[in-house]
């Protein structure tokens, strides 16, 4: 009895289907070709995944650098101002300045950040704390219009200048109930250095 090579006829039929416009069935490829095609597809997919992952990492790094640079920005809380008292406050843990623009002047956020605290201290001083990854800014005595948890952009109005709390005139007399002592007490803590820094150094570099 003659031997009939069924595998030969199956592959031949598949080739004839392909030549008449069909797609070559995957099983019709020689075993070695199947392996080669599989390796090529795996390599291509691997390169795509690596490229996508690398692009994502670069984008994330760039975003982080922009954010950090954004947090370094610092401006004075007023467009125009007078320094009414130089660096002071070491006795109570500050390295602050008193800065004024006049009663009712708009106070602006010196940094991009978030309001983390808003309260009145034991001396009756309205206190506003704004923070980001680099700075913690504390301002006193103003009428603050923002709320705890609110995100701020640098230069955004946060309140108006007042003399609330413990403020004094040039002779050191309390201004409570009097038309004097309007200013903002400004203290800046640098989280990178772990210490208060002179606000004038930051303002002079804006």
Image (cartoon, grey):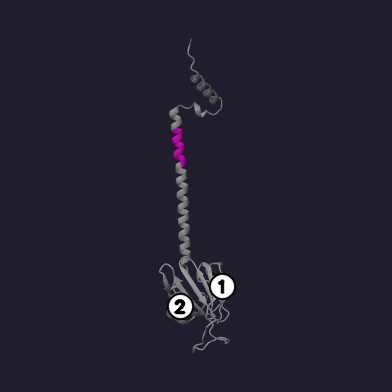
Q: Along the line of sight, which residue is nearer the eye, 71 or 20?
A: 71
Residue at the far front in the pictured view: 122
To which quarter of the image does residue 146 belong?
Answer: bottom right
Residue picked out by circle 2: 96
Q: Secondary structure at mark 2?
A: strand
- Taking the spot 45% from the left edge, 53% from the top edge, the residue there is 58
- Taking the spot 50% from the left edge, 29% from the top edge, the residue there is 26
- Taking the spot 46% from the left edge, 78% from the top edge, the residue there is 96
State yes or no: residue 37 in magenta. Answer: yes
State yes or no: residue 68 in magenta. Answer: no
Instruction: Specify whether residue 75 is in view.
Output: no
* Residue 15: mark: none
* Residue 158: mark: 1
Residue 5 in the image: state x and y as whole percent: 48, 17
User: How packed is label 2: few (under 14 Cα within 10 Å), some, or many (20 or more)?
Assistant: many
Q: Along the line of sight, which residue is nearer the eye, 51 or 27?
A: 27
- Image: magenta residue range: 36-45
Residue 167 in the image: state x and y as whole percent: 52, 84
Residue 145 in the image: state x and y as whole percent: 59, 73
Q: Secondary structure at mark 1?
A: strand
């Amino acid at each position: 009895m003659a031997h009939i090579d069924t595998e030969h006829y199956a592959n031949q039929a598949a080739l004839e289907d392909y030549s008449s416009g069909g797609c070559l069935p995957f099983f019709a490829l020689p075993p070695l070709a199947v392996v080669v095609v599989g390796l090529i597809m795996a390599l291509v997919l691997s390169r795509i995944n690596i490229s996508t992952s690398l692009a994502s990492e670069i984008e994330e790094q760039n975003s982080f650098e922009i954010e950090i640079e954004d947090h370094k920005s610092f401006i004075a809380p007023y467009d125009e101002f007078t320094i009414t008292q130089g660096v002071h406050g070491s006795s109570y843990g500050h390295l602050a300045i008193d800065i004024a623009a006049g009663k009712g002047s708009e106070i602006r956020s010196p940094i991009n950040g978030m309001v983390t605290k808003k309260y009145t201290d034991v001396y009756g001083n309205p206190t506003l704390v704004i923070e980001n990854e680099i700075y913690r800014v504390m301002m006193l005595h103003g009428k603050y219009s923002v709320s705890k948890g609110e995100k701020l952009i640098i230069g955004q109005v946060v309140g108006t200048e007042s003399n609330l709390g413990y403020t004094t005139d040039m002779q050191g007399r309390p201004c409570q109930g009097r038309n004097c002592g309007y200013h903002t007490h400004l203290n800046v803590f640098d989280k990178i250095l772990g210490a208060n820094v002179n606000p004038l150094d930051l303002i002079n570099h804006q």
